[in-house]
Image (tube, rainbow, N blue to C red):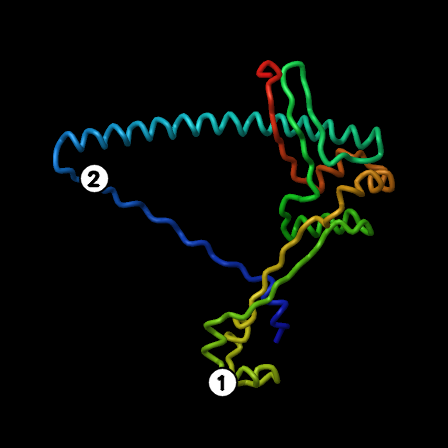
């Protein structure tokens, strides 16, 4: 039988399917109350639509500015051989603080394998596996748990495989962003290419229009 911990790492949880929602029309003591609530719901729907539209526009602008912010950040590293934790991105009409953090987008096992294979020796990826017991199976077999450790046959093979659950996560190693320039020089890569590979989190703060001052 394969190692239980190895099997636990590869298990996935199936997603539950959503169902159609029931429609309920509220009842009121008078037509006036019904009309007031109707208008409130309509106003809510209109405001929600406006917010959604503004949110979509904001996200689009946020993405555009972050892209330009990262481009300028990469150029700074190329030209100066170091990084700043944050800087002010400025135009004729506005400013915004750009922060590129020592935090990274989540990566999966496939992406982790790619980075390890393509950047051998650079040590970009951290792997962390957390093991836990399936409580229901543990309680069900509590009288023979001690025997399980000694590979007893008191628990079915099916339950043995379910007993230990494991979740493995992968992440870019903390501190990588501080090594970007050196890594890029050692591997003869553009900083931009390496930054795209590790995908650090970028944030925009304190945006101001100069005409507002």
Mark 2 packing: few (<14 Cα in 10 Å), some, or many (20+)? Answer: few
**Up-down relation of residue 75 to residue 176 (above or below):** above
In the displayed structure, does residue 28 sit left or right of residue 144? left
Please, what secondary structure does the residue beneath circle 2 have?
Answer: loop
User: Which residue is the site of mark 2?
Assistant: 25
Q: Which residue is mark 1?
A: 143
Q: Is residue 124 above or below residue 206?
A: below
Residue 40: where, in percent of width, then height?
27, 30
Q: Are marks 2 and 1 in contact (CB under 8 Å)?
A: no
Q: CA distance from mark 2 to mark 1?
A: 54 Å
Secondary structure of residue under mark 1: helix
Q: Residue at x 63, y 15 (%)?
A: 93
Q: Which quadrant of the structure image shows residue 204?
A: top right
Residue at image location 78% in from the left, 51% down from the top: 123
Left or right of residue 41: residue 200? right
Relative height, residue 141 to residue 112 (above, below):
below
Q: Position of residue 18 (x, y in %)?
A: 37, 49
**Residue 164 image point, x, y percent:** 56, 70
In the rendered image, the quadrant that contains the C terminus is top right
Camera-side residue: 209 or 195? 209
- Residue in the foreground of this view, choosing between 185 and 203: 203
Looking at the rendered structure, which numbered label has been put on residue 84? none
Residue at the front extreme, as displayed: 213
Q: Residue at x 78, y 42 (%)?
A: 178
Q: Quadrant of residue 45?
A: top left
């Amino acid at each position: 039988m394969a190692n239980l911990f190895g099997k636990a790492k590869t298990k996935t949880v199936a997603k539950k399917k959503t169902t159609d929602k029931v429609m309920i029309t509220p009842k009121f003591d008078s037509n006036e109350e019904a009309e007031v609530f109707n208008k409130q719901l309509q106003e809510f729907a209109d405001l929600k639509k406006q917010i959604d539209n503004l949110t979509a526009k904001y996200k689009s602008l946020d993405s555009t500015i972050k892209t330009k912010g990262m481009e300028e950040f990469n150029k700074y590293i190329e030209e100066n051989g170091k990084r700043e934790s944050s800087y002010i991105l400025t135009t004729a009409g506005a400013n915004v603080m750009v922060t590129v953090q020592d935090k990274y987008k989540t990566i999966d096992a496939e992406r982790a394998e790619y980075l390890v294979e393509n950047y051998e020796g650079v040590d970009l990826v951290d792997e962390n596996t957390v093991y836990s017991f399936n409580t229901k199976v543990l309680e069900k077999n509590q009288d023979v748990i001690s025997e399980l450790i000694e590979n007893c046959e008191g628990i079915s093979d099916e339950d043995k495989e379910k007993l230990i659950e494991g979740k493995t996560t992968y992440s870019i190693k903390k501190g990588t962003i501080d090594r970007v320039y050196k890594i890029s020089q050692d591997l003869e890569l553009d900083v931009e290419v390496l930054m795209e590979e590790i995908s650090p989190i970028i944030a925009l703060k304190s945006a101001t229009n100069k005409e507002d001052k």
